[in-house]
Image (tube, rainbow, N blue to C red):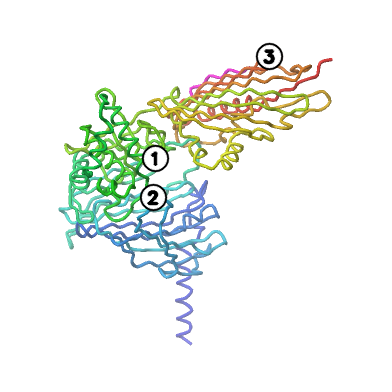
């Protein structure tokens, strides 16, 4: 009897301990607002055992409060021949902290990471999603990853998602005393604690955060680095794919890239060199020579991503690209540099953090290898520095667009690296100018044409349409323009690829029953070509500053020919708005049998104080009000 009683007692103690540990009632109440998931405990331990042996150990306990937090419980572990996964295991608990399931590496799905454009990709992923539909639930898991390198140390980002609260998270970096590092702390309430073990002699850098509230999803928020906790670590000496190196500054990192990854990779065949020399013969201007060579590169290559081993950082040789006629961003920039070198034009291989929605600059005070995800080309002409993206076969020479504009990048040269800033496109540069001429008959049918010219970052806005078949183009344009019953008769595009590029779109259309015609009244939407439908949503107690990534100017003019015998019944629309965020003017007037509508909207890019967000919402609400204005025509007596 005693053994049975002892067993029961131990069982209930174990259950009680589990409940005490992961019962959701133990989550501090002030962590629950805006949270879809809570990190109950996170322990990240990174140990550099040698330059080619870094061990990453993680233990995570996450409570998912509702279905919006499910993604926080998804586990993705990436590996390749230089990255090994070990010791994966986990447990699922119900709301009371009682175990309901467990899992191991055998329960993970194993798949490739093909992205649709990578020809060479050796990384795979092991993926696990808990099969749980009852909320809340808690997942506890741990794993170990071994990296055969010490160049890239994973960042610590304890609150890296909106809707994620953090009860406790710790990050420990362990190394031998002679393994030197630099670190960058962002948005932490307390700094690093450094200690040395008396038993092993190993040095530990330790960080911890507690009780971080969930960040809301706020429209127009600034870059995450401005408000989320983070630690970045960079080694002084390292090894990567058998190549050793050291750096503490951008100058030293850029020189390592130039010396160890780029050197002796820019030779092309004698035949290609001869062809390039003949192609540029008689062109005196170095910039025009470079343009000719850039277009030559575009005509004979295509973009293919390469993500194998050192190929993640080192380009194909120029000779390989010349022979194979393809390459990734690294290889195509390197190849273009080789072609330019044939005619004596200097250029820089530049790493950049490419993002069309956020301008992410390299940190001026902290050099690290992980701050770039793309390579572009810089041509340092005297008083006329020119930038090129070599991955597109269609964009003009000297055009970057919003993917890489207005941010710090690292230029890598034999003399060393240096931070440079890519050009900024102003609102005046980013002009979209449109003129429409429409005729409306007394039955409400409309016909006419629209001509739109797009400049600056808008230049490639229609590229995705241009690349389609004509049938698909027509469908896409019908989705772009909210014109009732639009039937496109003709559609064409012209692209000016000069140093001030533009795209011109011409549409001829008909729209049966565009307007509502009944009992001598005709009603239609004044602005059917370029209107803002929804203002930004209201956000109470905003935390982040307001960030507008790109400024632009829209100028629209629509000339309506009205049906004979009708006049405008309602007041003529006129509105002028002036705000720190931009300006908006709209007007309409009647000239004989024509109604002329003009609209101009200027949006100013920049960062604004968080308490100005209601003003931004008001600004957009006023624009939406004007953009949804309806015109009523009445038949003359």
Q: Residues within 10 Å of mark 2 (few under 14, many from 20)?
A: many
Q: Position of residue 408 (x, y in %)?
A: 31, 34
| Residue for badge 3 | 590
| Residue for badge 2 | 158
**Where is residue 292, by image quadrant?**
top left
Residue at horizontal 48 percent and vertical 87 percent from the top: 1
Mark 3 and mark 2: Cα distance apart in space? 60 Å
Of mark 3 and mark 2, the one earlier in the sequence is 2
The answer to whether residue 248 is left or right of residue 20 is: left
Q: Is residue 543 magenta?
A: no
Main SS of the magenta part reads strand
Residue numbers of the magenta segment: 574-580
From this view, report whether residue 445 is shown above or below residue 99: above
| Residue for badge 1 | 392
Q: Quadrant of the C terminus?
A: top right
The answer to whether residue 265 is left or right of residue 360 is: left
Q: Secondary structure at mark 2?
A: loop
Mark 1 and mark 2: Cα distance apart in space? 37 Å
Q: Position of residue 261 (x, y in %)?
A: 22, 47
Instruction: Confirm or deny contact between disc 1 and disc 2 (CB under 8 A).
Output: no
Q: Residues within 10 Å of mark 1 (few under 14, many from 20)?
A: some
Mark 3 and mark 1: Cα distance apart in space? 46 Å
Q: Residues within 10 Å of mark 3 (few under 14, many from 20)?
A: some
**Where is residue 405, by image quadrant?**
top left
Instruction: Confirm or deny contact between disc 3 and disc 2 (CB under 8 A).
Output: no
Instruction: Give the mark toward the camera: 3 or 2.
Output: 3
């Amino acid at each position: 009897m005693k053994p049975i009683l002892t067993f029961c007692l131990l069982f209930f103690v174990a259950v009680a301990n589990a409940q005490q540990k992961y019962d959701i009632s133990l989550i501090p109440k002030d962590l629950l607002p805006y949270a879809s998931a809570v990190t109950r405990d996170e322990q990240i331990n990174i140990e550099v055992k040698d330059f080619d042996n870094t061990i990453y150990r993680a233990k995570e306990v996450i409570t998912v409060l509702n279905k919006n937090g499910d993604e926080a419980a998804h586990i993705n572990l990436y590996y390749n021949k230089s990255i090994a996964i070990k010791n994966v295991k986990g447990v699922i608990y119900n709301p009371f902290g009682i175990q309901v399931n467990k899992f191991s590496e055998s329960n993970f799905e194993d798949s490739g990471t093909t992205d649709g454009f990578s020809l060479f990709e050796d990384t795979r992923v092991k993926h696990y999603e808990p099969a749980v539909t009852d909320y809340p639930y808690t997942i506890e898991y741990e794993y170990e990853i071994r990296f055969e390198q010490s160049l890239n140390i994973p960042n610590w980002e304890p609150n890296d998602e909106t809707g994620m609260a953090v009860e406790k998270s710790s990050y420990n970096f362990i190394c031998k005393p002679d393994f030197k590092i630099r670190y960058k702390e962002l948005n932490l309430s307390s700094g690093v604690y450094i200690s040395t073990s008396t038993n092993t002699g190993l040095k530990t850098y330790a960080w911890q955060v507690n009780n971080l509230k969930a960040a809301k999803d706020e429209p127009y928020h600034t870059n995450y680095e401005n408000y989320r906790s983070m630690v970045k670590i960079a080694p002084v000496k390292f090894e990567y794919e058998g190549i050793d190196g050291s750096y503490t500054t951008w100058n030293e990192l850029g020189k390592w890239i130039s010396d160890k990854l780029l050197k002796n990779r820019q030779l092309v065949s004698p035949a290609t060199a001869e062809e390039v020399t003949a192609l540029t013969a008689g062109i005196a201007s170095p910039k025009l020579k470079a343009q000719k060579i850039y277009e030559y590169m575009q005509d004979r290559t295509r973009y293919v991503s390469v993500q194998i081993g050192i190929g993640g950082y080192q380009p194909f040789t120029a000779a390989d690209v010349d022979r194979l006629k393809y390459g990734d961003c690294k290889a195509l920039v390197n190849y273009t540099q080789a072609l330019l070198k044939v005619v004596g034009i200097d250029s820089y291989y530049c790493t950049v953090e490419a993002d069309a929605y956020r301008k992410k600059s390299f940190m001026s005070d902290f050099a690290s290898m992980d701050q770039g995800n793309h390579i572009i080309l810089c041509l340092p002409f005297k008083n006329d520095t020119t930038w090129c993206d070599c991955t597109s076969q269609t964009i003009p020479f000297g055009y970057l667009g919003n993917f890489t504009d207005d941010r710090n990048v690292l230029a890598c040269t034999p003399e060393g690296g240096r931070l440079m800033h890519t050009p900024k496109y102003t609102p005046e540069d980013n002009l979209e100018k449109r003129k429409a001429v429409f005729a409306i008959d007394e039955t409400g049918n409309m016909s006419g044409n629209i001509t739109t010219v797009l400049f600056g970052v808008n230049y490639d806005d229609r590229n995705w349409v241009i690349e389609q078949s004509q049938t698909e183009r027509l469908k896409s344009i019908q989705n772009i323009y909210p014109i009732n019953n639009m039937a496109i008769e003709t559609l064409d595009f012209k692209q000016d690829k000069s140093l001030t590029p533009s795209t011109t779109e011409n549409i001829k259309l008909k729209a049966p029953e565009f307007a509502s015609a009944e009992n001598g009244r005709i009603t239609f939407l004044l602005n059917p070509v370029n209107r803002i439908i929804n203002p930004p949503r209201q956000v109470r107690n905003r935390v982040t500053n307001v960030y507008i990534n790109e400024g632009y100017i829209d100028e629209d003019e629509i000339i309506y020919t009205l049906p004979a015998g009708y006049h405008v019944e309602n007041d003529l629309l006129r509105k002028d708005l002036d705000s720190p965020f931009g300006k908006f003017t709209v007007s309409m007037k009647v000239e004989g049998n024509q109604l002329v509508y003009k609209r101009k909207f200027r949006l100013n890019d920049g960062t604004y104080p968080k308490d100005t967000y209601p003003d931004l919402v008001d600004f957009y609400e006023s624009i939406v009000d004007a953009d949804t204005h309806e015109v009523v025509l009445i038949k003359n007596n």
